[in-house]
């Protein structure tokens, strides 16, 4: 049975999604465990740096807005596209990104809510694929047959 360690500072919905994978899951609020005891270590707070490699996510399309408040920075910068990045730390290796469009009349809370939902789905899906040693491609990560999930094209 595969084992996951989840590092978190505060509760986030992605934790429930990760636990629902059916793997043995232990949650930690500090680094008082051995990462070698787990098949995958996931952090739900990418601002917390660890001395070992973890799977984590960020609410922007890295390398853009790699700060502590990426959604706020994106909105204030006036960009029209942001998204979610799932990556390994130490060394930083981007595994998956998913774009989110920012419309002129979009409210910060709506953008943040959409990004956190996509983060929950994307991080969970990538973790599951890694643990099953299965390949994945971005157009199938969120269950869509289309590249961006918009159903507007045949890609």
Image (cartoon, rainbow, N blue to C red):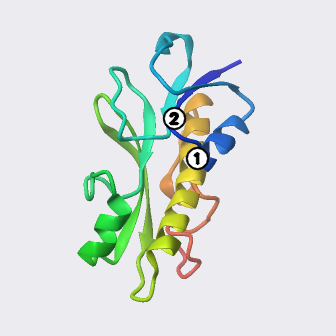
Examine the image and state in which quarter residue 134 appears. Answer: top right
Q: How many labels does the image show?
A: 2
Contact? badges 1 and 2 (CB < 8 Å): yes
Vertically, is 41 above or below 122? Answer: above
Residue under the point 50% across and 51% down: 137
Circle 1 sits on which residue? 12
Residue 70: x %, y % from top left:
33, 59
Circle 2 sits on which residue? 8
Vertically, is 102 above or below 47? Answer: below
Examine the image and state in which quarter residue 124 appears. Answer: top right
SS category of the residue bearing label 1:
loop
Residue closest to the eye, 111 or 85: 111
Distance from the alpha carbon under mark 1 to that under mark 2: 8 Å
Residue 16: x %, y % from top left:
68, 42
Going by the image, does 10 lie left or right of 20? left
Residue under the point 50% across and 71% down: 109
SS category of the residue bearing label 2:
loop
């Amino acid at each position: 049975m595969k084992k996951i360690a989840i590092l978190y500072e505060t509760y986030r919905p992605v934790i429930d999604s990760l636990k629902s994978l059916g793997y043995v899951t232990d949650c930690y609020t500090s680094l008082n465990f051995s990462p070698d005891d787990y098949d995958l270590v996931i952090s739900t707070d990418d601002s917390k740096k660890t001395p070992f490699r973890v799977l984590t996510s960020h609410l922007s399309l890295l390398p853009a807005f790699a700060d502590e408040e990426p959604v706020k920075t994106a909105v204030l910068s006036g960009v029209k596209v942001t998204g979610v990045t799932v990556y390994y730390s130490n060394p930083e290796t981007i595994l998956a990104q998913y774009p989110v469009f920012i419309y002129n009349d979009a409210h910060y809370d709506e953008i943040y809510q959409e990004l956190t939902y996509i983060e929950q789905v994307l991080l969970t899906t990538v973790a599951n694929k890694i643990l099953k040693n299965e390949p994945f491609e971005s157009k199938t990560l969120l269950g869509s047959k289309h590249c961006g999930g918009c159903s507007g094209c045949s890609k």
